[in-house]
Image (cartoon, grey):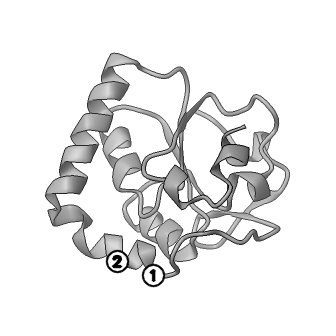
Amino acid sequence: MLKIDEISENLYIGESGLWIAQTIDEISYPSDGNELCAEIEDSSFWFKHRNKAILSVMNNFSPRGAIFDIGGGNGYVSKNLIDNGFDCVLIEPGVSGASKVVERGVKNVVCATVESAEFRPHSIPSVGLFDVIEHIEDDLSFLK
């Protein structure tokens, strides 16, 4: 099991169980985006189908180590991966989304951007960017 405190010196554990960055970055995602998704995720054909597709890919190309679900929103994908035997760490800069993830029972939740979390180089074994890149203003720099 991956230990968050061993791969970042810029995160602390809050009272709610969230790992929180000591610095806060601006994000290019609507402030009510997580709340809107939370209203429909459990009943949406799209979200259910997407989870099945992601799980199929993960089962066919299993990552080594924990999957870091970057921009994981309310934890719908991470919870499904965990329920199906994968180790997962959710990274979500939005407080409302990260809080919802904790409510869903996901243990490793980081409320930060990848940049503000300041993970040690080469410490993240696998990354998932599920419906994230289109929300990043400078996506090319992020991917580099």
Structural distance between the alpha carbons of marks 2 and 1: 6 Å
Q: Nearer the viewer, residue 133 or 83?
A: 133
Quadrant in which residue 10 is drawn: bottom right
Q: Residue at x 82, y 68 (%)?
A: 23
Q: Is residue 31 above or below residue 50?
A: below
Which numbered marker is on residue 32? Answer: 1
Q: Residue at x 34, y 77 (%)?
A: 36
Q: Is residue 82 left or right of residue 43?
A: right
Which numbered marker is on residue 36? Answer: 2
Q: Is residue 142 above or below residue 73?
A: above
Q: Is residue 57 left or right of residue 71?
A: left
- In x, y percent, where is residue 59? 32, 22
Q: Nearer the viewer, residue 7 or 29?
A: 29
Q: Callout 1: few (<14), some (14-19), or many (20+) C-alpha neighbours within 10 Å?
A: few
- View extreme (bottom): residue: 32
- In x, y percent, where is residue 53? 25, 36
Q: Callout 2: few (<14), some (14-19), or many (20+) C-alpha neighbours within 10 Å?
A: few
- In x, y percent, where is residue 99? 50, 71
Tag 2 near tag 1, CB within 8 Å? yes
